[in-house]
Image (tube, rainbow, N blue to C red):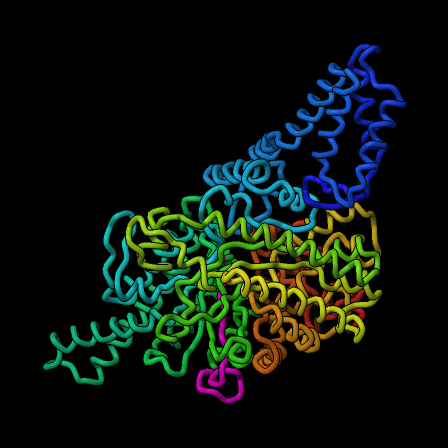
Amino acid sequence: MKVIKRDGRATDFNSDKIKVAIEKANKEVRPTQRATDEDIANIIKYIEELDKKRILVEDIQDVIECKLMELNKYELAKKYIVYRYTRALVRKQNTTDESILGLIKNTNKELMEENSNKNAIVASTQRDLIAGEVSKDLTKRILLPEKISKAHEEGILHFHDADYFLQPIFNCCLINIGDMLDNGTVMNGKLIESPKSFQVACTITTQIIAAVASSQYGGQSVDIKHLGKYLRKSYVKFKTELEEKYSDKLSADLIESIAKERLKSELASGVQTIQYQINTLMTTNGQSPFVTLFLNLDKDDEYIEENAMIIEEILKQRYKGIKNEKGVYITPAFPKLIYVLDEHNCLKGGKYDYLTKLAVKCSSKRLYPDYISAKKMRENYEGNVFSPMGCRSFLSPWKDENGNYKFEGRFNQGVVSINLPQVGIVAKGDEEKFWNLLDERLELCYEALMCRHYALLNCVSDISPIHWKYGAIARLKSGEKIDKLLKGGYSTLSLGYIGLYELTKLMKGVSHTTKEGHDFAVRVMQHLRDTTDRWKKESGLGFALYGTPAESLCYRFAKIDQKKFGDIKDVTDKGYYTNSYHVDVREKIDAFAKLKFESEFQSISSGGAISYVEIPNMRHNLEALEELVKFIYDNIQYAEFNTKSDYCHVCGYDGEIIINDKLEWECPNCGNKDKNKMNVTRRTCGYLGENFWNEGKTKEIKARVLHL
């Protein structure tokens, strides 16, 4: 007989649990009211003889209460009922006190480090985080079905962004910035008309970004191609003014030269406005806007030359960085940059190769931009090239009533991720058990995602005017429901996944980079994709498979499983799970092979996927980086570079950290010598083996590396 627990799990019937529960109640009543061992045995026998294949745990408890009443053990029955009720209260009790107090006292490390764009020490941010903890508690105890809450707690799945689930707001989006700039918008009840210059367009764009970020919890992306029109407006404006005033005094060539100089100045000021506004603005939830700028040169764009100028300026300013409070140039966290590689800029003699070389130089120092191959993306998305949403999830192709593809003005309703390694741990290498268990847990994920959907149904446009009424997503009427934008695939619901590598190790004993492991991993990925496709067909909603980049979730799942199942070699003993389909960081695989291998999984994970390679000493390896960029264009849709760059955690300096005459690492900006408070890159050749001190050669520091 299987007992169905409150979280929906099926477990074997265990009579000892009934015996223990009644004996606990026995201890709290008079001896005459106690059930004897024979009484308890008879109750257990009665339940067993019901001969049910499946029975709810609540039904078992009902039977126990009835049988105790039949034995005239009224006092005992009452105690058992009270015990049962008390246990229910414990499950429903408020759980926020400790986490909130830890936040205020700066001891809740997990919450304080969860988001890169939130400074958890600042009062305004703490206010949002406190509200988030209340939302999590209400979500867990009241809003979600108990089995979903339980599955989240046990690491079966992760219900993302529970700290915002209390409100009917969504995850991330592609802002329809072109419509908002061209047709105007409204903010705080004030009409914002279409701008007449590039500088004003940049200012309005940052205001829109802040307003949008205040009414959603995920990232947003802006395609900068819509700014090209306004850069040309500024040029026409400058030239017209000069011609009207000085056409009889200055030559046409001189007027042209002056107009271009003024345009160059406005271009720099406008881009600086975007960069500084995004990094200094605080949204109403106490954080910097999580925003991505999409840098794409469309060959059919009439403003392609202006947009090339804008991209160049964005890259130059990002390379320079932003000064911190000590006046040191550092890498800003936002905006994130995504640079599109196409035929005209893939370093194969194209007209805009100079921009790609600048992008590579910027990546070498500032890590951004990330890179998208237009060639590979067109293969995966019906010939389209478009930005991922701020959280790196991708929308599925969708056509309007006129048969035109539409991406901007669409959004993601929410994300739920499945813990793949835990399925493998429980299956213990039994494939039949694995596939059955995987399907059971996928259905839990489906129910959790539908909770996301139902939470947004019947919401009206007034709940976030900037999104629903004034162009960021739509231009609905006041009081109009947003339901039509939730259905038909217009918006997405994302199934994330963690730990394909660890799952393959558990089920096949090898990495998914081997042939046997690869075949199994592809079957798993295809099954996940087929499942989301089936959900989409059956529900009419835009389900998608999403290789979530949530690094913190890799640690959360691993921590839960290590505590529950102990150390498992190459799985829980590492302290982390490998993100989505990625190759484990400990595998010896070169950057080109890694990207080529992972590209196959990106095409399956169409709801979002990014791959990355870690390269030491990027500033000294520009030619190697350029070769990688060429490779990205031909082989993989979406990739980024990581590095172990020099960085001082005391002052934020991210230039080259030196070694002084005493063989000590020393920050040239603040003098910090504490190795625990700085990152230092091994330079010159990128060797990553063991180092030794080459004594007597303090001025030939590079000789201390074995490789040299």
Task: Residue lying at the far bottom in this picture: please name it.
Answer: 349
Compared across the picture, whether 386 is left or right of 80 comes to left
The vertical placement of 303 against 3, above or below, is below
Q: Position of residue 211 (x, y in %)?
A: 37, 51
Nearest the viewer among 677 and 101 is 101
Residue 148, percent across and down? 63, 45
**In this view of the protein, which residue sits in the foreground, 361 or 32?**
32
For the stretch drawn in magenta, the main secondary structure is loop
Please tell me which residue is depicted at 22% across the width and 85% down the height of the picture: 253
Q: Is residue 347 magenta?
A: yes
Q: Is residue 169 shown to the viewer in this render?
A: yes
Which residue sits at x=47%, y=68%? 387
Where is residue 54, by image quadrant?
A: top right
Would you say residue 121 is visible in this rendering?
A: no
Give percent across and percent down for residue 337. Answer: 49, 66
Give the quarter of the figure containing the N terminus: top right
The residue sitting at the left extreme is: 248
Q: Is residue 178 above or below residue 323?
A: below
Q: Which quadrant does the C terminus fall into?
A: bottom right
- The image shows residue 28 at horizontal and vertical percentages of 78, 15
Tell me if 621 is positioned left or right of 423 in this view: left
Say whether residue 162 is magenta. no
* Magenta-highlighted residues: 334-353
Question: Which residue is at the front of the view, 610 or 233?
Answer: 610
